[in-house]
Image: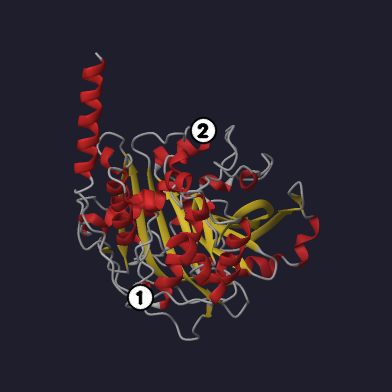
Amino acid sequence: MMRRTGKLACAGIVIFALSQLLHPTIPTSPATAEFQAPPEVRSIIEQHCYSCHSDQRRLSWFDEIVPGYWLVRHDILTARRHLNFSTLGSAPASVQKATLYEAVNMIQLGAMPLPGFTKLHPDARVTPDELSTLKAYLSPWSFPPSSSATSPQPVLAPISLPTVSPEFNGFLFAPGFEGWKLISTTDRGDNNTFRFILGNDIAFRSAQSGHISPWPDGSEFAKIAWQQVTGADGLVHPGAFIQVELMLKDARRFRQTDGWGWGRWRGVNLRPYGKDAHFVDECTSCHQPVRGDDYVYTLPITAAPVSREEIVNKDAAALPAGLPFQPLSWNPITMLVDPRTHTTATLFGNETAMLGVHARGAVPAAGPMAHAYPAGAVLTLVTWVQRDDPHWFGGRIPASPQSVEFVQVAANGQASYRQFSGAALTEDQAATQFAEARTRLILSLAPAQLP
């Protein structure tokens, strides 16, 4: 028995020694366009990120030992494909900034450095102070959106949504996304954009019931993005349409991509984003840090009883039952932000109001629009205070509601106004003093442009 054990041990040693010869290289090269940043920022990135995310070779002695070396090599080559600080400097400034925002969010959510890597390399962990330094450098909302042009925006011929090409992975476009209900909104200071996150009927009902861990098959989201513009009123409005991103849950069909189908279509012509089917790797890697929330970043605005923290946005859903209408189940028309008061507002319309909304292909000129809404139309402007998005540094989401304003169009074209405000959102009887001005404002809000 002892002899047999000794032979096995010797064989193991020989195999181990021979395996060290199977040592494929990790390519290295001088930096061609290194990421540029202030010294204190570069120091943090070089110390904690360059081991995997650069063309430099920075392995510890134990990383060189096979079979561990094979795993380390795989992780490094994968990391370089996603982010390489040795070449990032060749990308446009906006791309460099967006890449660093994503990196900071990965660090903040605990996804980077990889937990398995930090077990053997504890010095790779980014300290809270270092993370604060990176955030201070990025400084979202330091650069306000551009002012809107005084000349009218061009009228665009709307594209035929059923004819939009599928993504390069075969994922189909959803022509009916414009009619989906609001799940949440986001004000992105990292890139000066607004986002509506809409859900189809399955997703919306699931959010309202709290059955979102996991989301049921058939749930589909549309994340619509617009560039921000600052109006003459000092408010920030949606400007040019940028893109729409889609997610469809089907755990069996999309089991290779975390149970979700992914697609993105950019510009008013809704061009598929990817160059080939591998574009989906960007989607899955970006959403990996929120796998505990079924890979969904958004906190749905819902009062559903959910035990976990920061999975739904109950505060934003706290509208009293005594309001004349419950607008959160209506369709959204547009949104705006007041940077002076740090509030965000979304304009909703009932089914009749939506008959007067012509968002596709054109942005109506500002001015009284009561004539555009038929009799029986009800518009509701819900205003919330803002808070930081716990899932994305650089984003802000609605928090507690500050006011709810209703404008109802009568048969004679006249419009009535009611406001509910304060901590309890009770009716403001003094609202008649500014009813005309607020009615004019609400009716003049142009629908956010759609392709």
Tag 1: Cα neighbours inside 10 Å, few (<14), some, or many (≥20)?
A: few
Report, in whole angstroms, how far the alpha carbon at label 2 lies from the one at label 1: 44 Å
- The label shown at residue 33 is none
- The label shown at residue 209 is 2
Name the amino acid, label 2. Answer: Ser
Kindly identify the residue that appears in the image at 47 percent across and 40 percent down.
293
Q: Which residue appears farthest toward the right when viewing the image?
A: 430
Label 2 residue SS: helix
**Percent from the top left, x then y, of residue 319?**
65, 44
Name the amino acid, label 1. Answer: Ala
101 or 74: nearer the viewer = 74
Q: Which residue is mark 1?
A: 91
Q: Is residue 130 left or right of residue 203?
A: right
Kindly identify the residue that appears in the image at 23 percent across and 55 percent down.
278
Q: Is residue 115 left or right of residue 302?
A: left
Considering the image in quadrants, where does the N terminus appear?
Answer: top left
Label 1 residue SS: loop
Q: Is residue 112 above or below residue 89?
A: above
**Percent from the top left, x then y, of residue 143?**
57, 77
Q: Is residue 431 above or below residue 112?
A: below
Q: Quadrant of residue 56?
A: bottom left
Kindly identify the residue that appears in the image at 44 percent across and 67 percent down.
98
Residue 171 seen from this side: yes
Q: Is residue 8 left or right of residue 235?
A: left
